[in-house]
Amino acid sequence: MTGKVNKAARQPRPLKAARPYCFLSYSSRESHVPSLLPCLWIAFGDHFDLKLTPSALESGASQREQIVSLIKDAAFGVVVLDGLRPNVVWEYGLLEATGVPVILLKEKTAAVDIKGFLGDAAQLAIEPKLIDVNTHFSNVKDVAYAPWDRLRPEDTIKLLLEQYRKKKDKIRSYKEIPDPKLWHT
C-alpha cells in the first residue's frame, strides 16, 4: 500500500434533510407500554421518525444533553404517564418548557411505579395505586390527557391520530395523516 489517501473519501457527505420526528417519553419499567409502540409506528411512522430512549442515544455522550437536544428538535412529543416515573415527568416538563406540543397519555389501568421508588422495600404489603393525575401530578391537573387501552390497539391508533390532529396549528412539520387501513374494512 502506498499510503495514498482517496481524496473523495475525505469529502463530507452531503447532508440529507432530516425527517421530522416525535419524541416519546415513557417508563421502560411498565411492562404494557411496548404494546403502545406499534400503535405509534402505525399512526405516525410513514410521516415521522420516532425517537425514544435509550435507543436514540449515542454511547459515550451525555444522556441528559442528548435528551435535551432530542426534545428541543422534536416536531411533537408523546408522553406516557404510566408509572409516573421522575424521568418521564422531567421530560414532560422540558417538552412544555421548550414549547414542543405534547400528546399526553395515561393507560386506563396505569398505576404509580411504587417499586421504582422504594426498591426492595416495595416487598411490603403495598397495593398498586392507580394514577390519579389530580392527586399525584397536581401541577397538570388542568391539562387534559388521553386515556389509552393496551388491549385495544385499533382504538389506541385512532386516539393517537385524533390527538395529533387537535394540535394541527401547534406541530411544526404537521402533515395530514389519513386513517390507516387496519384489519377492518
Image (spheres, grey):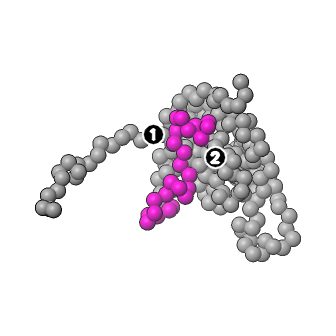
Query: Which of the two marks, 2 or 1, is nearer to us in this view?
Result: 2
Direction from residue 96 to residue 30 in the image, left or right: right
Q: Is residue 44 magenta?
A: yes
The label on residue 77 is none
Dot 1: element:
loop
Measured as percent of width and height from the top left, residue 162 is found at 67, 32
Q: Name the kind of residue labelled 2 in the image.
A: Leu
Amino acid bearing label 1: Arg
Measuring 56% from the left and 31% from the top, which residue is drawn there? 169
**Where is residue 4 drawn, in percent x and y?**
14, 58
Badge 2 crowding class, 10 Å Cα cut-off, few under 14, some 14 to 19, many 20 or more, is some
Compare residues 102 and 134 and report the one nearer the observer. Answer: 102
Place of residue 15 in the rendered image (x, y in percent of width and height, measured from the top left): 33, 43
Q: Residues within 10 Å of mark 1 (few under 14, many from 20)?
A: few
Q: Is residue 10 magenta?
A: no
What segment is highlighted magenta in the picture?
Answer: 41-64
The total of numbered circles placed on residues is 2
Spatial separation of the CA atoms under disc 2 and disc 1? 19 Å
Q: Quadrant of the C terminus?
A: top right
From the image, tell me which residue sits under label 1. 19
* The furthest residue to the front: 1
Please identify the residue farthest to the bottom as the structure is shown.
120
Residue 124 in view in this figure: yes
The residue drawn where x is 43% and y is 66% is 60
Q: Position of residue 115 (x, y in %)?
A: 75, 67
Looking at the picture, tell me which residue is in the foreground, 157 or 169: 157
Tell me the residue at 81%/73% (across/down). 123
What residue is at 47 percent from the left and 46 percent from the top? 73
Q: Earlier in the sequence, mark 2 or mark 1?
A: 1
Does residue 95 appear anywhere in the picture?
no
Locate the N terminus and report the quarter of the image it occupies.
bottom left
Query: Where is mark 2, residue-wise?
Result: 37
